[in-house]
Image: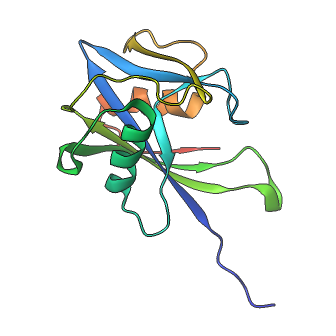
């Protein structure tokens, strides 16, 4: 059997800050890191750009509108899933920041999210997904790339 290239799963994460607070949501019923806080996030679909994915996910999850030109890349993470061997997945996570948007964030996915709140950037909840915390902490330091797993 010829060698097949492995596949990378790209995902996008949105950093929204207001009054020195960051918007986080708590995951439920997803089967991945339920009960922990994360950023507005999602997978990039086939044929979709990273910025288009972020614009789409933001509107789907929290109902705010962001223009792709208002998104700024602030961090990239090369990440491996917890599984090992053939079950391990390779991911590339793109963290973007928007300084302006239209609308007020609201939870549009109550079956996947049971809390949507602004948290003090210097006092993040203890139950935040660890690799998300790593990215959030790296951004103000100007660290544009990290690895996890």
| Residue 115 in the image, given as x and y percentages of width and height | 53, 16
Q: Is residue 45 above or below residue 30?
A: below
Instruction: Tell me what residue is drawn at x 61 percent, y 30 percent.
Output: 112
Frontmost residue, 107 versus 120: 107
Nearer to the camera, 108 or 98: 108
Residue lying at the far bottom in this picture: please name it: 2
Give the left or right position of residue 8, taking residue 72 as reference: right
The answer to which quarter of the image holds residue 141 is top left
Q: How is the image coloured?
A: rainbow
Q: Residue at x 38, y 11 (%)?
A: 122
Give the image quarter of residue 26. top right
From what the image shows, is residue 60 above or below residue 53? above
Image-based side of 84 in relation to 32, left or right: right
- Figure label count: 0
The answer to whether residue 148 is left or right of residue 57 is right
6, above or below 143, in the image: below
What x and y, as percent, mark residue 9?
Answer: 57, 58
Residue at the image point whose x is 18% and y is 43% from the top: 70
Q: Is residue 138 above or below residue 17?
A: below
On the image, the x and y values in percent for residue 118 come to 38, 14
Residue at x-position 39% and y-position 32%: 138
- Residue 38: percent from the left, percent from the top? 52, 28
The N terminus: image quadrant: bottom right
* Quadrant that contains the C terminus: top right
| Front residue of 109 and 12 | 109
């Amino acid at each position: 059997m010829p060698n097949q290239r492995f596949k990378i799963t790209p995902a996008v994460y949105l950093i929204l800050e207001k009054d020195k607070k960051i918007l986080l949501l708590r995951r439920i019923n997803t089967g991945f890191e339920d009960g922990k806080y994360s950023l507005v996030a999602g997978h990039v679909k086939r044929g979709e750009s990273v910025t288009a994915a972020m614009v789409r996910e933001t509107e789907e999850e929290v109902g705010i509108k962001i223009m792709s030109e208002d998104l700024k890349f602030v961090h990239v993470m090369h990440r491996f899933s917890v599984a090992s061997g053939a079950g391990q997945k390779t991911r590339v996570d793109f963290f973007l920041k928007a300084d302006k948007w239209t609308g007020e964030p609201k939870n549009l996915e109550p079956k996947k999210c049971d809390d949507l709140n602004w948290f003090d950037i210097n006092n993040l909840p203890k139950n935040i997904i660890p690799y998300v915390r790593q990215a959030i902490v790296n951004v103000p330091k100007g660290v544009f790339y990290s690895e996890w797993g």
